[in-house]
Amino acid sequence: MIVGVIVSGVIGAVGVILYINHKTIEAVDQFVLSMSPFVQVDYDKVSSSLSGAVSVEGVTMTLPSFSDPIRIGSVGFKLPTFLDLLSLHNMGPLQIARGQLPKSITVFADGFQLDTGDDYMMAMFRAMEADAAEKNGGTIPTRSEDPLGHCISRYGVSSRDLLELGLDRMTMSMRYQVEQMDGEIGASLEFEIQDTLTIDTRFSIQGRLADFASGRTDRARLMRFEIEGETQDITKRTWDRCETMGVDRDIAKEAYITSFLAGLAEGGFVADDRLIEPFRAGVIAEHQHFRVIGDPPQPVDIQQVKLYSADKLPALLGVDYQTW
C-alpha cells in the first residue's frame, strides 16, 4: 500500500515536470521564432523542478551582421512552488488585475560570456569611440597626447583597455527577485562580473505587485534602498595600469573623482560634501567595498523624483555613502 502511494507520487511528480517542460519548450520556441528577425537564438535544453524553477540551458545568441555568438550558460526563473508554475500558463490581464500573482519571482542568468575580441564587442567599442570623438570636437587625443584621459577612460573603453586590465573574457551572472510583503514590494538585484565586480541592490517600495504588473505605478512610494558592491582587485589593477602609462597614481585618482562626480551631475544627481568626502577617501585609499544607503525621511513618490532639482535629491532620498 505504502509502496503504491510512493510510486504514484513519483509518477505524478515526473508527469508534472514533463508537462512544465513541454509548456516551457513551447513558450521558448515561440519566443525564438518571434525574435528571429532580430537575433538568432539556439539552446540545448529546458529543465524544471518541483521547487518551482525553470531554466533554459546552453543558450547562444547571434546578432544580425555579426558572426560571433553571445553565450549564456542558463537563463530562467523561479516561483515559490511548482503549483505557481502550473498556474502561470493561465495567467492573463484579469488574473493580474485581481492580484492573483505568485508572492515572489526570481529571474536569473548565469554564465553570460563576452569575449573582448568578438566582433559585436569591437563594434560597441567603435561606437563608444565615435561618441567620445563627437563630444570632444571630432577627434580623440592619442595616449601620448593625453595619457591621463585614457587612464581614467575619459574617452570610453577600448578592447586594448580591457586586455590591459586582464579582462579578455567577462563572465557575468545576474539574479533579480521581486517579492510581495505586507503592503510592500521587496526587490533585489545581484550582479557579478567574475573576478572583477559584484553589486547587490535592494529596494523596499510601498505598493502592490499587481499594480506594477498592470503598469499602475502612480501610488508607488520608495521606502528604502541599499546598494553594496565589491570591486575586488580591479581597483588596484586600474591604478597600476595608469602608472604603466606614465600617469602619477594620485593625480589619476583625483581626475577620476572629478570625472565621476561630473558624470553624476550630468545624469541629474549632484552629490553634497557629506557624500563626496567618503567617496574621495575610498578612491584615494583604494578601498574595494562600498555601500550606498537611501533612507528617505518619508516615503518618496517615485513619479515625482524627476521634478526635484539635482542638488535636492541626496536630502530627499536620505542618501549615505560608506566605503572600506
Image (cartoon, rainbow, N blue to C red):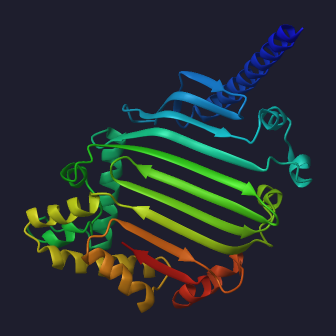
Residue 96 placement, left or right of 111: right
Q: Position of residue 218 (x, y in %)?
A: 79, 72
Q: Position of residue 64 (x, y in %)?
A: 46, 36
Q: Residue at x 66, y 29 (%)?
A: 28
Task: Decide: is 264 above or below 158.
Answer: below
Q: Quadrant of the N terminus?
A: top right
Residue placed at 11% from the left, 71% from the top? 247
**Residue 6 x, y percent position in the rendering:** 81, 14
Q: Quadrant of the C terminus?
A: bottom left
Residue at the location (18% across, 52% down)? 164
* Residue 195 position within the rendered picture, expressed as x and y whole percent measured from the top left: 33, 48
Task: Residue at the far front: name it.
Answer: 2
Is residue 148 shown above or below 112? below
Is residue 272 in view? no
Q: Is residue 228 visible?
A: yes
Which of the 4 quarters of the picture holds residue 210?
A: bottom right
Determine whether 47 is above or below 263 in the image. Answer: above
Q: Quadrant of residue 131?
A: bottom left
* Residue 250 located left or right of residue 301: left
Of 242 and 188, nearer the camera is: 188
How many marks do you count on the picture? 0
Taking the image as shown, residue 74 lies to the left or right of residue 22, namely left
In-image side of 296 versus 259 (left or right): right
Seen at 22% across and 62% down, the residue is: 236
On the image, which quarter does residue 170 sit in?
top left
